[in-house]
Structure formats: structure tokens, C-alpha cells
Image (cartoon, rainbow, N blue to C red):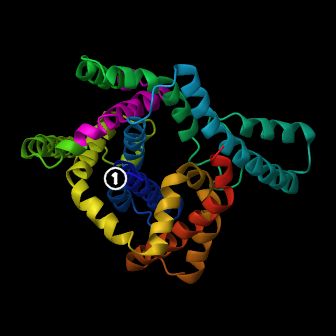
Amino acid sequence: MSIRDRRIDQLRSFAMLWVIFVHVLYWSTFITSEYANTIKSFCLFEMPLFFFVTGAANSFGRNTGYCNFVLRRFKRILIPYWVFAIICAVISIAKYSFEEGAFRSDAIRIFISWLIPNDAQITSVPYLKWALWFIPVYLCIVLILPLLKKYKQSKERVVFGILLGALFVVTDIFNLGWIQNVSFYCLWVYIGLFYTEIKENIRSKNFCGYLLCVFIISVVLIGILYFSSQSLDMQKNKFPPNIRFLIFSVMMISLIILLLPCFFRAFDYIEKYPVAAKIFDLYSTHSLTIFLYQVFAFSFTIPLTDMIIPMEGGGFAVLKVLLCLFMTIPACACFAVIFSRFEKN
């Protein structure tokens, strides 16, 4: 494997690990105070980072024709999703039948809702559909990705990027909901397509200076929002993403890019340990499988954490987060081993 691929794999591993960390914070009830919710919401840069990495990975892909590209990507996404969906539909129908009694029409309705990846799956089982908003957004971005790659290679690439940003602002002003998700994450995929240029210039003082200015300006804007009594709870600003979440994302991603050399050195060191290297590899090569099946890991790691540490609040909350994360990361890796065969198709 080339260094180029390895670095992107490391970024993808980090993005998926951070997704798990964020879900420990938000899918559990370990930390729930209003003040703490605002503080922990500043960890919510996982999806901008994830789509940035998606753009970075696709920046090296060959042009194979629009239809071939879309069909291959849809197959890679939808086959693992449908396997997962069938499992979740069976669980949801079984729970419904146990609680309400068996009704064929309801079972069919639940089953069909799971087969259609439109974030409208029917279930009363905790966790199962909490992260599935990602699937339709990702599918839409696959349809647009060849266009993004085309303009990234053109002379108008900067203008096109500005237009993408303007498009997102328009969707936010008119409160277009789901379309805001697509336009927002398209912007981060497009920025990720410049990964090679970013990596080549990351040690340049001028480039780092520009990036530091972007970070400082973003921090100042966040401060202005705070003193203007605007909500800085990024969980509220994320669904759908608004301009406040864009400013926050720019702040965090610019900081991550500035720290990339340190980040890569840290990953190189940790990967010297075989178990860590194996987990990182699974999180990189089977990120979709882990993203889907994390719900089953959380179904037992969160209750188990509450059982091991029954105390609430303060330092116990932090201990519970760390313990749950420590158990969930390898549990998700185990699900990747079991179900990754479907992601390979």
C-alpha cells in the first residue's frame, strides 16, 4: 500500500472512531446537563470530516464513466445496507408482534420501510435508525460526485467551490431541510478532493498561515455568535446543518488539517501495536459496515456500562464514557469481521 493510501486510511479510521465516540456521548444518558450538552456538541465535526475523507479518497479514483461509477458505488452502499435492513426489519417486526400482536399488513409496511433507504424506517427498537439519515445523503452525493471531480480539475474550480458554499447558504436561508444536508456535505466532499494539494502544502508556512487565519476568523465568528445569544449547541445546528454549523465545521476541519503531521505521527506510533493496527484497518476498510452495525454494539455496551458503573454525574459520567468507548470500539470491529463480506461486493 502506498503512503498516500495509508494516510487516507488513517484519516478514515480516525473519522469512524470519532463517530463512535460522538455516539457514546449522544446515544447514552451519561452526560445530559444543558451546559454539558453545549460543550460536548463541539465534538460534532465527525460528519464534515467523514465527507472530507470521502472526497480525499475519490480524488485518486479513475474516470470510468458516469453510469459505471454510480452503479458501482450504489452497489457498494446498498448491498450492505439491505442486508442490515433485513436484519433490522425482522427485529422490528418481532418486537411489534410481541407487543401489539401479529398483523401481516403492518409487518409488510415495516419491512418495506426498511428496504427503502430514505430515513423513514419504522421501528420502536432503540438505536436502529438513529444514524441512517446518512444513507440517502450519501447516495445523493454519489450522483453528484463525478460533477464535483470534473470542476475540481477545471480552471473554474475556485469559483465552483464558492458557488457550492453560496448554494448551501441559500438552502439555509430558505430552510430547505434535507436539501441542506446534501448541499452542506457536497461542499466538504469537494474540499476533500483537494487533499493532494493540501497534503503537499501542509508544511508550507504560507499555507499554514492562511489556514491559521481561517481558524482564527472562525473562532472570532463563534465568539460573536455567543455574545449575540445565538445557540452554540451544535447538535441543534446540525440537523439540518445551518450557517452556524458551517462556521463551526470550518473551524474544526481547519484545525485538524493544521495538525495533520502530528496526527499521522501519532497513528504511525499506535499502529506499531498489532491489535491497534488491526482495529484501525477494520475501521478504514469496512467503515460502512461499522457505521451500520454499531447499533448492535451500543445495544449491549451502554446497558453494560450502566451496570458496571451505576453512579451518575460528575467524574462518574466521564468514566462511563471512557468505559463504554473502550468496549464499543472492539465490539464494532467484531461486527466488521462478521458482516464485511457484504461490503466487499
Q: Residue at x 36, y 71 (%)?
A: 270
Is residue 94 visible in the rendered image? The answer is yes
Q: Residue at x 91, y 51 (%)?
A: 101
Callout 1 amino acid: Ile
Type of secondary structure dominating the magenta stretch: helix
Total numbered labels: 1
In the structure shown, which secondary structural element does the residue marked by tag 1 occupy?
helix
Q: Which residue is identified by label 1? A: 3
Residue 286 horizontal/vertical position (percent)? 55, 53
Q: Quadrant of residue 242?
A: top left
Q: Is residue 66 left or right of residue 255?
A: right
The 10 Å Cα crowd at callout 1, few under 14, some 14 to 19, many 20 or more, is few
Residue 308 horizontal/vertical position (percent)? 56, 82
The residues colored magenta run 169-198
Q: Quadrant of residue 118?
A: top right
Asked if the magenta segment contains residue 171, the reply would be yes
Residue 47 horizontal/vertical position (percent)? 42, 45
Residue 132 drawn above or below residue 333 = above
Q: Residue at x 60, y 52 (%)?
A: 289
As rendered, which of 65 and 115 lies closer to the eye? 65
